[in-house]
Image (tube, rainbow, N blue to C red):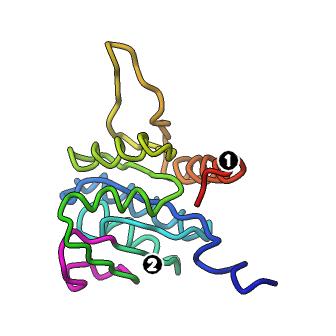
Amino acid sequence: MSPVTNSVRSRIHLSVVGSSLASPEEAAVAERVGREVARAGAVLVTGGLGGVMEAASRGARLEGGLVVGILPGTSRIEANPWVDVAIPTGLGEARNVVVVMAADAVVAVGGEYGTLSEIAHALKLGKPVVGLATWQLARAGRPDTRIREASSPEEAVRLALDLARAATVRGSRL
């Protein structure tokens, strides 16, 4: 077996994005998403702060998963306590692009305008996006269905993993 076979490089990375000021319902959903990401053996990537990011991180860590936080500031200490690997960028909101680039697929839970920017970057980069009670898009009055809507955290993670694997088969995963 190659030393890379079970390494972080060979595992699917899922970014979970959403508001840093999540409602209790959004936080509960995000925590379940994080748990499912860890159960699947994928790496969880978030923006590393509070709200949806912290709830997903908590869920993943409680299931023994690996959590990466891509931080907007310049210090690792701003990461939520559930982050295993904290990466300060000094990029502010521009770090949203890095959160998306680090992922094979994105799961959006609720969200504000920062979440919308992450969804937009993911779609622009050809990354699959799965939504749970998140933004809906339309162009010239016609629905844009590239955000795949899921009805549960379990479905969202399963769909995101399937879409990430399909992208790997097509050769688009780095």
Q: Is residue 74 magenta?
A: yes
Q: Which residue is mark 2?
A: 61
Q: Which residue does the image show at 44% across and 51% down from the upper left?
A: 107
What is the crowding at mark 2: few (fewer than 14 residues within 10 Å), some, or many (at least 20)? Answer: many
Q: Assign a secondary structure to mark 1.
A: helix
In the rendering, at what x and y percent does residue 123 appear?
Answer: 43, 40
Q: Alpha carbon of mark 2 to alpha carbon of mark 1: how far?
A: 26 Å
Residue at image location 40% in from the left, 56% down from the top: 100
Q: Quadrant of residue 102?
A: bottom left
Q: Quadrant of the C terminus?
A: bottom right
Q: Is residue 73 left or right of residue 120?
A: left
Q: Main secondary structure of the magenta part?
A: loop
Q: Position of residue 49 (x, y in %)?
A: 24, 69
Which residue carries the number 1 mark? Answer: 166
Q: Amino acid at mark 1?
A: Ala
User: Is 134 situated above or below 51?
Assistant: above
**What residue is rendered at 33% in x and 56% in y?**
97
The answer to which image quadrant residue 39 occupies is bottom right
| Badge 2 or badge 1: first in the primary sequence | 2
The residue lying toward the viewer, choosing from 97 and 57, is 97
The span picked out in magenta is 70-84
**Of the pair 103 and 60, the residue shown nearer to us:** 103
Residue 64: x %, y % from top left: 52, 81
